[in-house]
Image: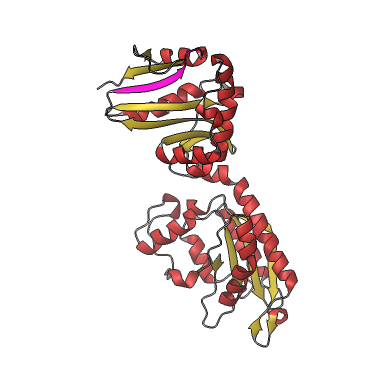
Amino acid sequence: MLICSTRPGALGPAVGKWLTETLAPSALTLDAALVPLALGDLRLPFLDEEEHPSTGVYRHEHTRRWSAIVDEADGFVVVTPEYNYGMPATLKNALDYLGPEWAWKPVGFVSYGNTSAGTRAVQHAKQVMTTLRLVPLGSTVAIRITDAMREDRFQPRAPLGDAAEGLLAELVRVAHALTPLRERERVSAVAGPVAGSYARRLTPDDAPEVTVLQRCCWAEEAVANSTLAIPALHESPHQVRAWLTDWHATGLWQDGRLLGMVRTRRSGAELRIGRLAVVPDLRGVGLGRWLLRMAESAGEGCRRIVLSTGAASSRNLALYESQGYAPLRVEVDAGVVHLAKTVPS
């Protein structure tokens, strides 16, 4: 929540305090962390970076700090006054400092003023924000100062609180909808093998999607191997969350859908690969091979790569053998084939 005015005695901090208190119950219900931030506390000078913001090359510590704050956020609520039919220079300056950090994030406005209740500042700000690929919401909160003051104190009526709750709910919905676009823009994301897909490291927060993928994919394995004793079929989201913490797992995504995954972990001189899975409707188009190669790229410095599959999983066995894996002579688990291949030195 960006509180934009830096004037001594400005109304902005009071509006921000009211907004934080009003939205606290809704934020808890929506699992949203609403973090107030006064632009004046950032102490940003007028834009003093030599490189264009699109490069992400920042010379000054104040820019790097501001970049980290914006990059971490999933959306913004801008609390702004109107100055001479426009937004405050502090907001324009803060926007101009950065580039990719703003992209594909929703922004809602809580404006305040006299005749127009700050709405002309909002219209001015939208022109700049859409250029930065911020996505303005339809919901707004417009506060006429004379209607919201009671004995020189900021005490807005209930309808404004209802409007603020509607704004936050819309902000959260749009933030979730824009997640795939934000993730594709991140430096850590890797372009995937099908149009519009990308790969990124899975985190514990991805446990629900991973749980669904596992149960979808390993049901077929259970039929092929005539057994339900497959851990991936029975793990709860809590258990999945636990191993996502311990393993390095990569997910392949497209438009918010988890298409496939694989996990790796080093053990001495070995790289262990597991949980290679692709959604059933996209099997046979090379996603499994692509994910396997991604996993193998983590094997630098290892002597060999080891993985396992069901003894009757003919599709899996054919894939692994085509990629240079050979069954190990020692079988540790009944009904499971362990395979390995040597990593070139």
Q: Is residue 115 above or below residue 99?
A: below
Q: Residue furthest right?
A: 159
Is the C terminus in the top left, top right, bottom left or bottom right quadrant? top left
Of residues 31 and 294, the one nearer the viewer is 31
Number of marks drawn: 0
Give the residue at x 47% y 39%: 202
- Residue 195 seen in render: no
Tell whether position 309 is magenta. Answer: yes
Residue segment shown in magenta: 304-312
| Percent coordinates x, y for residue 155 in the rendering | 67, 79
| Percent coordinates x, y for residue 114 in the rendering | 69, 78
Give the residue at x 47% y 54%: 71
| Percent coordinates x, y for residue 162 in the rendering | 72, 66
Give the residue at x 51% y 12%: 312
Colour convention of the picture? secondary structure
Of residues 285 and 275, the one nearer the viewer is 275
Hey, which quadrant is residue 117 in on the image? bottom right
Of residues 152 and 327, the one nearer the viewer is 327
